[in-house]
Image (cartoon, rainbow, N blue to C red):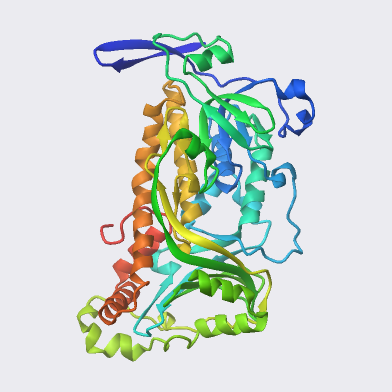
Amino acid sequence: MNRIFATKAGSNVYRLRIPWRPLSNDAAPLLSSQNAGNPEKESEAKQYDIAIVGGGMVGLALACSLASRPLTRHLNVAIIDSNPALGRKHFIKKEDLPDPRVSTITPATISFFKDIGAWQFVEQHRHAYFDKMQVWDYTGLSYAKYNARDADKEVLGCVVENKVLLSSLLSRVQETDLPKKIYPSRLNSMSILPNSSSSEVDSTLSMTALFTHGRLAKLELEDGNSLYVKLVVGADGGKSRVRELAGFRTTGWNYSQNAIICTVEHDVENHCAWQRFLPSGPLALLPIGDKFSNIVWTMSPKESSEFKSITEDNFLKAVNRALDYGYGPHPTPSILGSSDLFSWLKGGISKSANDCFEIPPKVIKLASERMAFPLSLRHANDYASKRVALIGDAAHTVHPLAGQGVNLGFGDASTLSSVISEGIAVGADIGEVSLLKKYEADRKPANVMMMAVLDGFQKAYSVDFGPLNILRAAAFHGAHHISPLKKSIISYASGEMRLPLFA
């Protein structure tokens, strides 16, 4: 059965016949590896409603979100990714030490994972909720401490290894009834033709004919497979092949900074997220559970090379020094509370004994390799065009100082699946740019605002200048003591996309 809807172009109104039901490939197993080595099968083109290029955390989250919605759960989905882990049902061993690649998941993302049925799998593996966070800088002038109770929340977030998130999403998508197939390959080329001048296109035409009329995109994979799809979703990271082939331009810059990440061990369990701003960049100490924490230390490329190569003992000493008296003194109550320097911020403040400055737990052992990667900011000028949409790092790459990158990507996945569902409800073509621009209009402002906030922090703490140091300290003082401001900051960082000063 076809649905009819009208679209207007200039003074002409065209009536298009669009199929409302999902495409129906013959029942296909989850992996296409059984076709390997069979040229006849590999040359057979397949048709799908959606091709998700990139089977990482954000791409699989989109698949799970589609599977959870009544109007999208029957869409035929291809997932294209060469990661061999996607072909294994279980690839996490409980006895393994924590992987240094982690994500700080916000309460909003936790709710999203629960909605799509993936959080139950996360809870089967190592993860660490935290309900407090302390942020301070090397000058010793001020600090800010956040508690979940300040914003009427149970937790501020949860630190989870990326491999746990990936495994949990994979487990969830495997158990759903979503018609899906994983292609362990890479995208080689993508072709999208303009719509034909015909006002109506018979949906029973062949794949080639629908492609010729601009109703399908054609994907060629490196393994020889050809796919015809209504919508291509680029979830393939910061060096997105989909973004490149679609011709999306980006704006951004490199920070001339690297981040060193690793797993460390304490002699006590850590329940707090710590972040200290140092002259070279922020140092974060994040709980992972089982007396382990994750280090994310931003510094110059030269320093990162040195800190990667020094002995374990010297590295641990450097970390403990940086989290204690190194680079400057601890903030003290006298500096915060009684100094005339901050007397103008005393009005309307709240104080608690639990808000006192604390020293992070000592690091006693290195529990993983030290990894380093360059930092940059990149943002696609457009998120959507005809039959193409970008999500996650393919659309935006941010500084890791607040751990917001993957949360923005999960927000993209949630919104895109919602827009697709709304389109199906009114009989729209899910690949039409007018529909996909609704997704862009929703997500782009929120992502740009978060990117601007993070970039502003990075720039504000990249300069050691007396008056600026005082302004930064005043901002910390207000964020720590003024309850409405503190609550707004926590809500914003938790995934509630409201500006802290205008909530």
Residue 305 place in picture, x, y as percent:
57, 72
Q: Is residue 382 left or right of residue 96?
A: left
Relative depth, front residue between 188 and 416: 188
Q: Is residue 244 left or right of residue 76?
A: left
- Placement of 77 over or under 234, stated as above or below: above
Res 401 quadrant in image: bottom left
- Placement of 71 over or under 244, stated as above or below: above
Q: Which residue is at 50% across, 82% downward?
A: 322
- Placement of 476 over or under 233, stated as above or below: below
Residue 193 place in picture, x, y as percent:
46, 20
Residue 258 place in picture, x, y as percent:
51, 66
Relative depth, front residue between 26 and 251: 251
Q: Is residue 149 left or right of residue 186?
A: left
Q: Is residue 374 left or right of residue 503?
A: right
Residue 184 place in picture, x, y as percent:
69, 38
Q: Which residue is at 77% across, 31% downward?
A: 36
The residue lying furthest to the front in this view is 302
Q: How many marks?
A: 0
In this rendering, does residue 273 appear at all? no
Q: Which residue is at 24% across, 12% downward?
A: 11
Res 456 quadrant in image: bottom left
In this rendering, does residue 73 appear at all? yes
- Placement of 162 over or under 457, stated as above or below: above
Relative depth, front residue between 174 and 28: 28
Quadrant where the image shows the C terminus: bottom left
